[in-house]
Image (cartoon, helix red, strand yellow):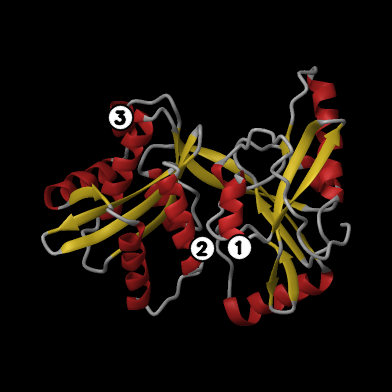
């Protein structure tokens, strides 16, 4: 990778390719990274052939380029040329290779690609490790009846039972959601892994742009569960959730069912945003969605790889079957 001392300034004057997800949007990346992101770009004259955003950060002594906070997927965006399959593949490989050559010299580079991004082979050819992650999606077009019929009976029962005692309604302001989220973390002696400031800024921005929604579940004693949703032109993403210890066991299921119906009305695909292990898989599988693959690319320096191996063996213990996206 070519050395780069700091992210180069992003120029909004250059016409961009259509971003495949909300997470590729400059305003999202500005807020998620505090402005510490840059764009690799391949041009042909005045035409953009390919783009790839990336984030630079520090992890102790290491210089890393992970996914930014609350950013589920990234990856390259390549302009299609309308060629036959063989020539189109060569075009995509050539442009993606030129993007890879512009990436910074870091100890760890890691991105998970949006389901619409299938350009991992060029990364494999440049020495990156390519791995598979998975998410469930309820595709558009769907009907609420179809989705309900595909659900596992246990999931339907959880939703029915929760709906008898819980009321679902949107939050008046992001601050209410954030307070609930932080208080539930504190009750479990945990801190906000995404960063409170970045989360607050992103939630406010998505609501202001009408690209997100926060909904809560309330019982007679008040708020017991909440989820955060964001969307772009084709997909609604399940971004965040929080649940009080006293909440009905079906509170999050009820909120997700509400979100799925909202996505259907908006003619959007609903993305459950992956899972980290068997329990998460079993929970999400109950909603009857389609399993979709996300490709991840990673490259580590020798020193960083060794340090991570020692940390896992000494501190972390065995790794889960599916690693989380963040």
Q: Residues within 10 Å of mark 2 (few under 14, many from 20)?
A: some
Does residue 36 appear in the picture of this structure? yes
In this view of the protein, which residue sits in the foreground, 71 or 157?
71
The residue shown at (66%, 78%) is 311
In this view of the protein, which residue sits in the foreground, 135 or 268?
268
Q: Earlier in the sequence, mark 3 or mark 2?
A: 3
Q: Residues within 10 Å of mark 1 (few under 14, many from 20)?
A: some
Above-or-below relation of 126 to 109? above
Q: CA distance from mark 1 to mark 3?
A: 39 Å
Question: Disc 2 designates what residue?
Answer: 198
Q: Earlier in the sequence, mark 1 or mark 2?
A: 1
Question: Disc 3 designates what residue?
Answer: 144
Q: Earlier in the sequence, mark 1 or mark 3?
A: 1
Q: Which quadrant, please, contains the N terminus? A: bottom right
| Contact flag, marks 1 and 2 (Cβ < 8 Å) | yes
In the drawing, does residue 172 fall left or right of residue 140? Answer: left
Callout in the foreground (1, 3): 1
Q: Secondary structure at mark 1?
A: loop
In the drawing, does residue 203 fall left or right of residue 154? Answer: right
Callout in the foreground (3, 2): 2
Q: CA distance from mark 3 to mark 2?
A: 34 Å
Check residue 34 in the rendering and tell me which mark sits there, or answer none.
1
- Total numbered labels: 3
Q: Residues within 10 Å of mark 3 (few under 14, many from 20)?
A: some
Q: Position of residue 202 (x, y in %)?
A: 48, 55
Q: Position of residue 143 (x, y in %)?
A: 33, 25
């Amino acid at each position: 990778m070519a050395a780069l001392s700091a992210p180069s300034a992003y120029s909004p004057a250059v016409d961009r390719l259509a971003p495949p997800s909300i997470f590729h949007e400059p305003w999202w990346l500005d807020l998620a990274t505090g402005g510490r992101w840059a764009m690799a770009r391949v041009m042909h004259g005045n035409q953009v052939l390919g783009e790839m955003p990336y984030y630079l950060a520090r992890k102790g002594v290491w210089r890393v380029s992970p996914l930014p906070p609350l950013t589920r997927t990234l990856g390259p965006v390549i302009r299609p040329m309308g060629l036959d399959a063989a020539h189109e593949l060569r075009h995509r490989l050539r442009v993606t290779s030129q993007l890879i050559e512009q990436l910074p010299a870091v100890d760890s580079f890691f991105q998970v690609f949006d389901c619409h991004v299938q350009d991992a082979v060029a990364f494999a050819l440049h020495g990156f490790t390519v791995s598979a992650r998975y998410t469930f999606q309820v595709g558009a077009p769907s009907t609420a009846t179809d989705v309900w019929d595909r659900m596992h009976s246990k999931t339907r029962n959880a939703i029915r039972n929760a709906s008898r005692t819980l009321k679902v309604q949107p939050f008046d302001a992001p601050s209410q959601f954030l307070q609930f989220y932080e208080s539930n973390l504190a009750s479990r002696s945990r801190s906000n892994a995404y960063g409170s400031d970045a989360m607050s800024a992103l939630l406010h921005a998505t609501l202001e742009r009408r690209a997100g929604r926060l909904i809560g579940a309330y019982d007679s004693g008040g708020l017991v569960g909440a989820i955060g949703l964001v969307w772009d032109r084709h997909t609604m993403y399940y971004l965040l959730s929080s649940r009080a210890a006293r909440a009905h066991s079906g509170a999050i299921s009820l909120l997700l069912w509400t979100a799925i119906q909202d996505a259907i009305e908006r003619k959007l695909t609903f993305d459950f945003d992956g899972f980290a292990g068997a329990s998460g898989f079993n929970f999400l599988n109950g909603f009857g969605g389609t399993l979709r693959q996300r490709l991840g690319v990673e490259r580590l320096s020798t020193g960083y790889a060794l340090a991570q191996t020692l940390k896992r063996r000494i501190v972390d213990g065995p790794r889960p079957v599916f690693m989380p996206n963040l």
